Image (spheres, grey):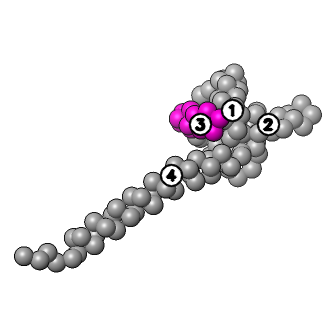
Amino acid sequence: MSSDDADDLIFKALSHRVRRAMLDALKPAPMTTGALCARFPALDRCTVMQHLRVLEDAGLVVAERRGRERYNHLDALPIHAIHERWIGPYAAYASAMLSRLRTDLETPAEH
C-alpha cells in the first residue's frame, strides 16, 4: 500500500466523530469491545464493530484477544505521521507568513 493510500485510510477514519470519540476513549488505556459499546449506548454492537474495523484498517487501533475478550489499543503513530507530513509544515508556513505580516505592519513606511 502506498503512503498516499495509507493517508487516505487515516483521514477517512478520522472523518467521523464517533471514531474520533472512540480514539479519545482509548487514549488513557486499552478497552474491551464491550466497554466501548457501553461507552456509546446510542450505537448497537454491530455499529461499534464497524467503526472499530475502519480504525483498524487505518492502523489506528490494534486489537488483542485475551480469552473471550477483545482489547482495543490506540496506536497514535499514524496520527503522528500525518502531523509530521501535513500539519507541522503547514503550521510552520502559516506562522512564518504571520511573522512577515507583523514585521511589515510594524515597519514604518517611507514616503
Name the residue at 57% across, 34% down.
8
Side of 64 where 88 appears, left or right: left
Q: How far apart are marks 3 and 2 (CA)?
A: 24 Å
> How far is disc 3 from disc 1 in space, using C-alphas?
8 Å
The label on residue 4 is 3
Q: Name the residue under label 1.
A: 1
* Circle 2 crowding by C-alpha within 10 Å: few under 14, some 14–19, many from 20: some
Of circles 4 and 1, the one toward us is 1
Q: Give above or below for 27 relative to 71.
A: below
Q: SS for tag 2?
A: strand
Q: Quadrant of residue 13?
A: top right
Q: Which of marks 2 and 1 is in front?
A: 1
Which mark lies nearer to you, 4 or 3? Answer: 3
For mark 3, does the 10 Å Cα neighbourhood hold few (<14), some (14 to 19), or many (20 or more) residues?
A: few
Picture layout, residue 91 above or below residue 63: below
Q: Residue at x 50, y 52 (%)?
A: 87
Residues at marks 2 and 1 touching, judged by CB atoms closer than 8 Å: no
Q: Which residue is disc 4 drawn over?
A: 87
Report the span colored magenta. Answer: 1-17
Q: Which residue is nearer to you in this view: 32 or 20? A: 20
Q: Where is residue 43 in the image (x, y as percent from the top left)?
A: 62, 26
Q: Distance between the residues labelled 2 and 1?
A: 21 Å
- Give the amino acid type for the residue marked by disc 2 in the picture: Ala
Q: Circle 1: is it few (<14), some (14-19), or many (20+) Cα within 10 Å? A: few
Q: Name the residue under label 2.
A: 63
Amino acid on which the number 1 mark rests in the picture: Met
Q: Which residue is drawn at 77% across and 39% down?
A: 62
Residue 52: x and y in percent read: 69, 31
> How far from the left and from the top, in percent, is residue 4?
59, 36
